[in-house]
Amino acid sequence: AGRVENLAFCPYEDVLGVGHAAGYSNMLVPGCGEPNYDAFVDNPNATKRQRREAEVHQLLDKLSPEMITLDPDAVCAVRPDAAEFAAENMRRREELEKDRKAQQKEKDDAKTKMKGKKKPTRRWRKKQLNVVDEKKVLRRQEQRRAREAEESKA
C-alpha cells in the first residue's frame, strides 16, 4: 500500500488509523483499546454538549447562592444606603463583641481552680506539715520560749 505517513489510535477503541501515500486505512488491533481512563475526567466518552453542561454546572457550584439572581441589573446596581448598611454592620459587630465578652467573663468567673493547686511540690509540702519529727518539736518549743521571753520583757 506504500509508505506510512501517520498513525493514530481511536481513544478507548481497538481501531488504528493509518495514513499512507495511497490514502487512508483502518486496522483492528484487538486489546489495544483497553480503557486506561484518566482519573480526573468524569466521563471520557462525553459529547461536546455534555462537557459544556458539566462545565456550566461546575461554575454554578462555585457561585454562592446569594450571587444567583433573576434580575440581570441587580449585579451592577449600587446600594443607595451604603452608609446605613455600614452603620448597621458596625452595630451588629459591636453587639456580637459585647455578647462574646459577656460569655468570656461568665466563663472566667466560673473558674474556681487556683493556679498551682495540684503541683507535686505543693502536695509534698502539705504532707510534710502533718509529719511530726524531733527537730520540728524542738524548734516549736524554742520559738514558744522566745515568744514568752519577749512578752515577759515587755
Image (spheres, helix red, strand yellow):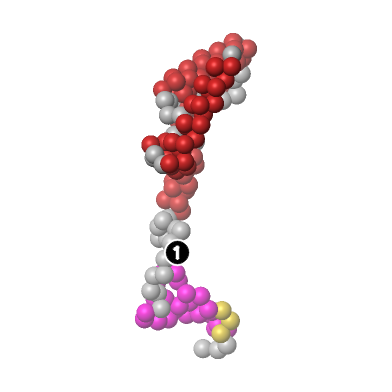
In the displayed structure, would residue 7 be above or below residue 127? below
- Secondary structure mostly seen in magenta is strand
Specify the segment rendered in magenta: 7-31
Residue in the image at 55% along x and 89% along y: 2
When asked about the image quadrant of residue 133, the answer is top left
Residue in the image at 51% along x and 75% along y: 8
In the displayed structure, would residue 1 be above or below residue 106? below
When asked about the image quadrant of residue 28, the answer is bottom left
In the foreground, 58 or 121? 121
Residue 61 visible? The answer is no
144 relative position to 77: left or right = left
Residue 111 visible? The answer is yes
Residue at the outermost left position: 30
The quadrant of the image that shows the C terminus is top right
Give neighbour class at mark 1: few <14, some 14-19, many 20+ (Cα, 10 Å). few
In the displayed structure, would residue 126 be above or below residue 95? below
**Residue hosting label 1:** 38
Residue at the outermost bottom position: 2
Residue in the image at 51% along x and 26% along y: 145
Say if the magenta span includes residue 143: no
31 relative position to 90: left or right = left
Tell me which amino acid carries mark 1.
Asp
Q: Secondary structure at mark 1?
A: loop
Q: How many marks?
A: 1
Residue 97: give x, y in percent of width and height: 53, 19
57 relative position to 6: left or right = left
In the foreground, 136 or 86? 136
When asked about the image quadrant of residue 19, the answer is bottom right
Residue 82: give x, y in percent of width and height: 61, 14
Residue in the image at 45% along x and 78% along y: 16
In the foreground, 135 or 131? 135
